[in-house]
Amino acid sequence: MKTILAVDGSDNSYEAVHVMKYMARSEQLTLVHALDVPRPANPEMAMMPEAAEELYKALEQSMREDGERLLNRVQSLLPLHAGPTKKHLLVGSPAEVIISMADEQHADLIVMGARGLGPIKERLLGSVSHRILTLAPCATLIVNGSAKAMKHILLPLQGSFDAEAAVRFLQLKPFDDTVELTLMTVLPSTEPPWPSHAAAAAAATELLEKQTEYIEGVAERLRATGYQAHGVAVVGTPSTMILQQATTLRSDLILMGTRGRQGISRFVLGSVSHAVLHKMPCPVLAFHA
């Protein structure tokens, strides 16, 4: 796998570095730090363009020196099995720099700490994390909080697109150690027009059984490739059930599908994105479906 590790010096960024201990050796590991150098905002500086430019260059130089120290420190913290490493210090918007680098390197995975997931949670929709998660050309691992060994992974699936993409991604063997996968699909809970109608209840039971059979079939395919995997089908609100399962099972990672550059899959749209990404009890890895 070709991996990009994007760092900004925040606590979550360093936790993303620690997560590399649990990821498989990279064919190429690219460390990226973006310098988002602000232009002087003082209106009076507009009257002195030469002074403004000098101030900008001085600030850029200072940030560049800090960035080089950060990249050197991150490199020193990487596990021995991380793989061959390159460092890139680039000026520009963090999201655009990271996405561009992922395109250029034909990356399979971006690893980064959560940004914009702080106390003002509505900032997510404008955050670096969300923009990269939505527009990146490859899978993205968002780390929020302390990194743990990835022993148990929750894999919510919605339909064959998610399932096939999950199998393809997991065939890359992205994790360094053996992991246990719990595959789950969520059937929205709907009240039949006649709650006591036996036919409606039977139809709901049959649908749940079919979904259980399907998800177990996907789990069997993953077991054939060396994973420990089992499937479950549940009824409820997707976001609630995903978070509930992740908490109950003490999952170390939630692995979810996206719809590429057209945005997040239905599993993480709207209110579900608030519930899963804002309240995620563990890191989230989004792959393209």
Image (cartoon, rainbow, N blue to C red):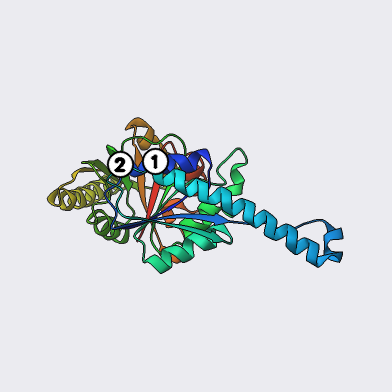
Which amino acid is tagged 1?
Leu
C-beta proximity under 8 Å, tags 2 and 1: no
Residue for badge 2: 22
Residue at the spot 86% in from the left edge and 65% down from the top edge: 47
Camera-near label (2 vs 1) is: 1
Nearer to the camera, 116 or 71: 71
Q: Position of residue 48 (x, y in %)?
A: 84, 64
Q: Position of residue 258 (x, y in %)?
A: 40, 58
Around disc 1, counting alpha carbons within 10 Å, would you say few (fewer than 14), some (14 to 19), or many (20 or more)? some
Residue at the spot 46% in from the left edge and 40% down from the top edge: 14
Above or below, comparing residue 143 to residue 37 in the picture = above
Residue for badge 1: 77
Q: CA distance from mark 2 to mark 1?
A: 13 Å
Report the side of 53 relative to 11 (left or right).
right
Q: Position of residue 191 (x, y in %)?
A: 41, 44
Q: Position of residue 277 (x, y in %)?
A: 48, 45
Q: Residue furthest left?
A: 224
